[in-house]
Image (cartoon, rainbow, N blue to C red):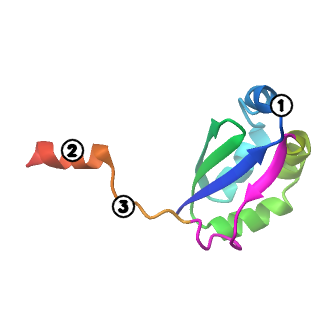
């Protein structure tokens, strides 16, 4: 499953966030692997952060991360830079991405025809 998350940085933290989030701790990478999080990419525009998460079961992973010691340490470190996640939903409801179209996919289809 693929979900999209949106979070907001606190004012004047963009540079520090970029530096501090250049890599996450290895124990958190191991937790992600154990919980079925295959990939997590973050893009930034101003103070807005856009997360694309590829995982087996987002709700189960998100719940497990709440009690994960590696994630708790990471959140204590990086969390003070972030206002929080923006969502109107509980869990993955409304967050899962449905692929509608891609230029690469359309271009590839035309080259095969």
Identify the residue at image location x=64%, y=65%.
58
Identify the residue at image location x=72%, y=32%.
23
Q: Which residue is mark 2?
A: 108
Which mark is first along the chain, 3 or 2? 3
| Labels 2, 1: front one | 1
Alpha carbon of mark 1 to alpha carbon of mark 3: how far? 36 Å
Q: Give me the disc on residue 22.
A: none
7 on left or right of 94: right
Viewer-nearest residue: 45 or 56:
45
Alpha carbon of mark 2 to alpha carbon of mark 1: how far? 42 Å
Mark 3 secondary-structure assignment:
loop
Q: Label 3 neighbourhood size at 10 Å, few (<14), some (14-19), many (20+)?
A: few
Q: Give me the disc on residue 100.
A: 3
Which mark is first along the chain, 1 or 2? 1
Q: Label 1 neighbourhood size at 10 Å, few (<14), some (14-19), many (20+)?
A: few
Image position, residue 102 (x, y; %): 33, 50
| Labels 2, 3: front one | 3
Q: Is residue 24 above or below residue 58?
A: above
Image position, residue 33 (x, y; %): 65, 51
Q: Label 2 neighbourhood size at 10 Å, few (<14), some (14-19), many (20+)?
A: few
Q: Is residue 15 above or below residue 55?
A: above
Please report the bounds of the magenta region as a residue range: 81-95
93 on left or right of 84: left
Image position, residue 71 (x, y; %): 82, 50
Image position, residue 99 (x, y; %): 40, 60
Q: Which residue is mark 1?
A: 12
Which mark is first along the chain, 3 or 1? 1
Viewer-nearest residue: 85 or 105:
85
């Amino acid at each position: 499953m693929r979900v999209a998350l949106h979070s907001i940085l606190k004012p004047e933290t963009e540079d520090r966030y970029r530096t501090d989030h250049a890599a996450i701790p290895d124990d958190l990478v191991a937790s992600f692997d154990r919980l079925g999080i295959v990939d997590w990419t973050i893009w930034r525009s101003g103070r807005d952060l856009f997360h694309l998460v590829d995982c087996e079961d987002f709700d189960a992973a998100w719940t497990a991360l709440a009690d994960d010691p590696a994630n708790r340490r990471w959140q204590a470190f990086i969390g003070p830079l972030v206002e929080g996640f923006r969502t109107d939903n509980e869990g993955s409801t409304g967050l899962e991405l449905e692929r509608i179209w891609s230029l690469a996919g359309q271009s590839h289809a035309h080259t095969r025809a």
